Image: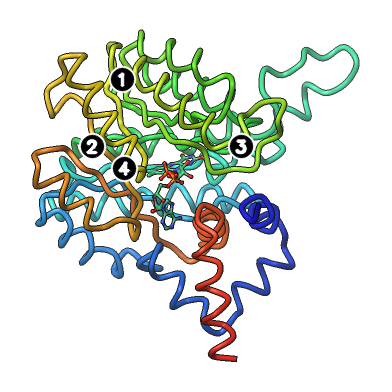
Amino acid sequence: MLGPVILAASRSDRMRRLISAAPVTKQVVDRFIPGETLDDVVPIIEERTAQGLELTMDVVGEDITTPDQARAARDAYLALVDRLAELELGARVELSVKLSMFGQALPSPATTLNEGPRGPAPAFQGGHELALANVRPVVEAAAAIGTTVTLDAEDHTTLDSMFAIHEGLRKDFPQTGCVIQAYLFRTEADARRLAASGSRVRLVKGAYKEPAEVAYQQKHEIDKAYVRILRTLMEGEGYPMVGSHDPRLISIAQELARRAGRKPDEYEFQMLYGIRSDEHLRLAAEGHRMRVYTAFGTDWYGYFMRRLAEKPANLRFFLRSMVSKG
Ligand SMILES: Cc1cc2nc3c(=O)[nH]c(=O)nc-3n(C[C@H](O)[C@H](O)[C@H](O)COP(=O)(O)OP(=O)(O)OC[C@H]3O[C@@H](n4cnc5c(N)ncnc54)[C@H](O)[C@@H]3O)c2cc1C
């Protein structure tokens, strides 16, 4: 019951100010977001890769309001790529991006021009073109150092634009990945299309507050959909990335991969930094490819609130720490 309330709070500016300024928040946030700057996270990148793990790095900051902020997001990712090149870790560390941070949700000049009774309706609203213009150089830079970019999935209203950008980028950079969410009704069809086209696809349960018209609401329905979609991906032509901490789904994924005749390097597991860390190492030690999604940056509020919503015990811990310090 608490999850949807926390997700609603994740969109509130008042809650953002309150939580961001709370005296103990930083200590609680660090569990999920281990640093604010590149210098903070480089030691983590070096340590985890030395342990046999791979990483996907996310610069947090989805709630931007200006094109300048979208360009700053692009530049932050380009700086990250430069640092990975210096570390010679392109082969082990990829990038995850949220297109909202690259300007997808901003009103664009193209939309304004197309407005009016006789103007053709734009294929996509808002900053679709802006997001594409900002993400392309990051994808190019990543490819130049031997790594890839995966487009995260945000709320359902953004997905047609995300898939169109993914398809466009794949013409030049076929290794570009994307994320699909098992809780959405549309995802089984998306999975069939992506599996047939040989894409790199991360499957997750889904972390946003979605209405009953578009998404399963019950955990058991989401889990069943996850298994159906995973089977499609494992039996398809692409590279499945199993994004989950759920022990049951992880065993099912291993079984589905075995039945589909996939070798250990023909799919991978992915988990979030700070969640079930022992399991990251256990799977890697068993010979699986295991990638840790590691977020960093100063604008951590949205990412942090989704982690609270996934496990209400996190919220209790957070509130207790506030009370004990207060
Ligand atoms: C690599 C990766 C990338 C992701 N990218 C996206 C994305 O692009 N778009 C999107 O909508 N969602 C994304 N997610 C989030 C995802 O949608 C789920 O919200 C999240 O993974 C929790 O679901 P679960 O599969 O782990 O299963 P759950 O049933 O939620 O959790 C299984 C077990 O994992 C542990 N666990 C799970 N979450 C937490 C937590 N926050 N704190 C502590 N323990 C926890 C608990 O032990 C829990 O019992 C991503 C997840 C991963 C792992």
> What amino acid is found at the position of numbered circle 2 in the picture?
Thr
Mark 3 and mark 1 residues within 8 Å of each other at the beta carbon: no
**For marks 3 and 2 on the same chain, the one whose residue lies earlier in the sequence:** 2
Q: Quadrant of the C terminus?
A: bottom right
Mark identifier at residue 147: 2
- Please determine whether, in this image, residue 184 is positioned above or below residue 119: below
Q: Earlier in the sequence, mark 3 or mark 1?
A: 3
For label 3, the crowd category at 10 Å Cα-Cα, with few meaning under 14, some 14 to 19 and many 20 or more, is: few
The residue under the point 36% across, 26% down is 201
Q: Secondary structure at mark 3?
A: loop
Residue 155's label in the rendered image is 3
Q: Residue furthest right?
A: 117
Residue 78 placed where, x, y %? 35, 48
Query: Mark 4 CB in 8 Å range of ligand 1?
Result: yes
Residue drawn at point x = 88 percent, y = 20 percent: 116
Instruction: Residue under label 1, please give it.
Output: 174
Q: Nearer the viewer, residue 309 or 198?
A: 309
